[in-house]
Image (cartoon, helix red, strand yellow):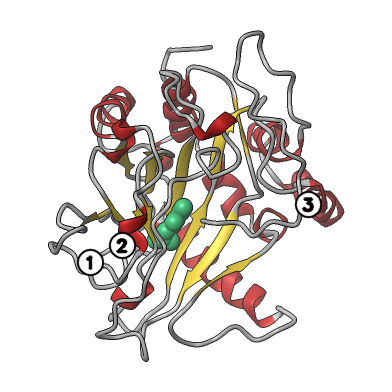
Amino acid sequence: MNLTPPQLPEDQKPSRPLETYLAELREHGYTVLDGVVDKAALARIREDTDAACKALGERPPDFDDRFGVPNSIAWSRDVCRAVTHPGALWVMRAYLETDIHFCHQPAMTVLRPAKELIGHHPESGWHSDYPYHPDVYPEDRWTDETIYGVQFNICIDAFRTDNAATQFVPQSHRKQCFPPVEMNRGGTRMGVSPHEAVAQMVAPEGSALIYDSRIWHRACPELNISGSDRLAILNAVCPNWVRPMVDKRPGVVVYRDSDMASSLPASVAEEITRLCCTPTQAAPVGSPNILEKPIGPRKINI
Ligand SMILES: O=C(O)CCC(=O)C(=O)O
């Protein structure tokens, strides 16, 4: 593990030293790494996502939902560059104290503006992220001090309180358990029990939210009253020996068939190979058996 932060090019430099983001992640369970994607790249990603949406077999809903646009590493060089941002990768490797991989292919998501949902409080949605899902972690006990996952969500649009910035419970990762069932009974009214401590992860466009996968959080589409889409690239990141949450191989085929790799800088192509295309590594001796469940056609709960 290289614990020396990398030197970053000007167009990928955050406003503070990388160590400060790592310290924040360690203290609060989340940090907002700014400057991951520049303005020109954000504009191209929005345009490419729009084109990819139009090519989807089924037309996605215009309101009240969040949907994924698959295979973004095959149709956007800027997505490849964003998900391999060397500063973000350094923070995550340092936090998990190991080398990492993505547990599903980078997921471009579009959160539509609310219409019918405005003023409603839909039930459920509270969860922790992979591998802290029910039936994945051995015996569903998380007493182990080692941390096995971070979520790496790149904000293509700013995350604001009026466009459904992700809801979360500060410091809930320290409780080492799933969100209690009461949180998913009845809708979420921030400030009202059992959601009195709920806050939102606000972040500028082009930044990355990096948070401990154990933190209790929820997508809140009813709060997108902005009238516009909110785009984000979601990534579940684990030590490279933790089995992926879905079969990544179909995404690898599409990426390889696209010939995207030949148009990427070598360092970006190498990281994409490492994070997205390399088989799961052997688990170190003594690690919990997070590998035992067979991969089925499960829905990605992100
Ligand atoms: O899209 C959001 O606001 C929530 C994202 C989420 O739930 C996740 O990354 O696990």
Question: Does label 2 point to a residue whose CB lies under 8 Å from ligand 1?
Answer: yes
Residue at 58% x, 70% y: name it: 49
Name the side, left or right, on which 172 lies relative to 276. Answer: left
N-terminal label among 3 and 2: 2
Read off the residue under disc 2. Answer: 165
Q: Which mark is residue 161?
A: 1
Give the foreground label among 3 and 2.
2
Percent position of residue 71, x then y: 70, 59
Percent position of residue 172, x then y: 28, 40
Find out whether the residues at labels 1 and 2 contact each other: C-beta distance under 8 Å. Answer: yes
Read off the residue under disc 3. Answer: 255
Residue at 38% x, 81% y: name it: 113
Q: Quadrant of ligand 1?
A: bottom left
Name the foreground residue: 154 vs 149: 149
**Residue 108 sits above or below residue 296 on the image:** below
Residue at 26% x, 38% y: name it: 15
- The kind of secondary structure element at disc 2 is loop
How far is the residue under mark 1 from the one under mark 2?
Answer: 6 Å
Q: Quadrant of residue 226?
A: bottom left
**Residue 277 sits above or below residue 72 on the image:** above
Amino acid type indicated by mark 3: Tyr
